[in-house]
Image (tube, rainbow, N blue to C red):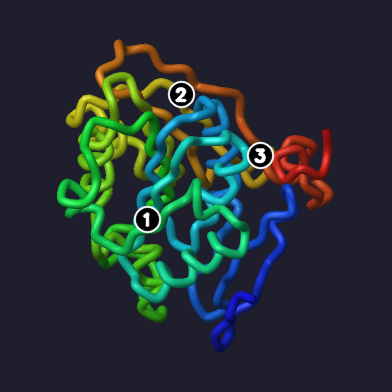
C-alpha cells in the first residue's frame, strides 16, 4: 500500500493503467510533458535514457511503457518531489526500469557515467529568473524558473551524458528558440526536428518540441503544426490520439 501525504492524490494517466502521485499545492504536470513523451516515442526499445528535472516522474513513467527502455534515470533536485516520484515508480511496479536520483543536474558527472546514454529527455524550467509571476511556493518557483539550473546547464550536461549520435528531446517556449539553438550548437548538439504547438488555429505558438543530436551534421526539419483545440474548444483528433483516446 502506497502512503499518501497531506494534499496528495493519485491520478490515473489513462495509459496502460499507469498512475501518478501529485500534490495539489505543488507543480502538477501539464500537457507539455504528455506531448514530449509522444515526440520522443521514436527512441528505440532497449535504450538508456536520462530524464533531467524529472519532477514527479511523469515523462519517465510514460516512456517506460511507450518505448520499453532498458533503463530510465530521472534526476530531481527537490527532495520532497523526488520522494513523491519514487513512490509513483513503486506504485507502477517500474523499479526495474525507472530509477530516481535526488541531485543537481550540474553534479551528475559524480553520479552517472558520461557518454553512455542513448537519449536525454527534459521539460526544464521555461522562465529566466526575474521574469513572470514569482509569488509562488518554492516547489512551483523552482519548477518554472531557472533558479537551480539554467537552460545552458541542461544543454551542457545533455552533451556530456549522451553517446555520440545520441539525442536530446526537449519541450520549451518559442520565445526561447534563439537561445536554445545557440546553446545546442555551442555544445555540439545539432537541431534535427522542431515542432511548434498552438492552442488552436489562428493563435500564436505557445510550446515547441525540439530534438537535437550529438555531433550530427546540419539538417533541420520543421514538422507540421500541432494544434491542441478545435474551434469548439474540444481537443483535436491528434491530441486525442496522443492521450490514447482515439486510434
**In screen coordinates, is 191 left or right of 62?**
left
Tag nearer the camera, 2 or 3: 2
**In screen coordinates, is 30 left or right of 18?**
left
Which of 198/49 is in front?
A: 49
Q: Which residue is mark 1?
A: 53
Residue 190: name its quadrant: top left
Disc 2 to disc 3: CB gap under 8 Å: no
Residue at 19% x, 31% y: name it.
187
Disc 3 crowd rating (10 Å Cα; few below 14, some 14-19, many 20+) is few
Tag nearer the camera, 3 or 1: 1
**In screen coordinates, is 62 left or right of 78?**
right
Real-space Cα separation, disc 3 to disc 1, in angstroms: 32 Å
Tag nearer the camera, 1 or 2: 1
Q: Which residue is mark 2?
A: 193
Which of 175/183 is in front?
A: 183
Real-space Cα separation, disc 2 to disc 3, in angstroms: 23 Å
Disc 2 crowd rating (10 Å Cα; few below 14, some 14-19, many 20+) is some
Which of 71/163 is in front?
A: 71
Amino acid at each position: 500500500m502506497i502512503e499518501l501525504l497531506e494534499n496528495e492524490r493519485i491520478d490515473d494517466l489513462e495509459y496502460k493503467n499507469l498512475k501518478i502521485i501529485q500534490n495539489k499545492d505543488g507543480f502538477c504536470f501539464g500537457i507539455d510533458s504528455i506531448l514530449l513523451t509522444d515526440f520522443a516515442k521514436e527512441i528505440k526499445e532497449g535504450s538508456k535514457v536520462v530524464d533531467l528535472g524529472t519532477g514527479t516522474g511523469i515523462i519517465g513513467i510514460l516512456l517506460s511503457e511507450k518505448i520499453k527502455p532498458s533503463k530510465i534515470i530521472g534526476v530531481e533536485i527537490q527532495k520532497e518531489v523526488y520522494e513523491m516520484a519514487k513512490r509513483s515508480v513503486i506504485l507502477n511496479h517500474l523499479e526495474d526500469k525507472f530509477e530516481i536520483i535526488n541531485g543537481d543536474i550540474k553534479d551528475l558527472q559524480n553520479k552517472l557515467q558520461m557518454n553512455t546514454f542513448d537519449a536525454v529527455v527534459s521539460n526544464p524550467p521555461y522562465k529566466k529568473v526575474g521574469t513572470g509571476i514569482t509569488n509562488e511556493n518554492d516547489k512551483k518557483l523552482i519548477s518554472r524558473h531557472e533558479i537551480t539550473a539554467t537552460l545552458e546547464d541542461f544543454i551542457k550536461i545533455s552533451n556530456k551524458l549522451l553517446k555520440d549520435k545520441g539525442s536530446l528531446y526537449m519541450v520549451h517556449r518559442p520565445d526561447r528558440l534563439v537561445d536554445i539553438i545557440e546553446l545546442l550548437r555551442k555544445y555540439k548538439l545539432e537541431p534535427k526536428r522542431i515542432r511548434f504547438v498552438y492552442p488552436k488555429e489562428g493563435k500564436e505558438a505557445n510550446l515547441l518540441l525540439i530534438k537535437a543530436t550529438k555531433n550530427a551534421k546540419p539538417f533541420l526539419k520543421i514538422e507540421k503544426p500541432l494544434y491542441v483545440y478545435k474551434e469548439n474548444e474540444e481537443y483535436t483528433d491528434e491530441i486525442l490520439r496522443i492521450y490514447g483516446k482515439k486510434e
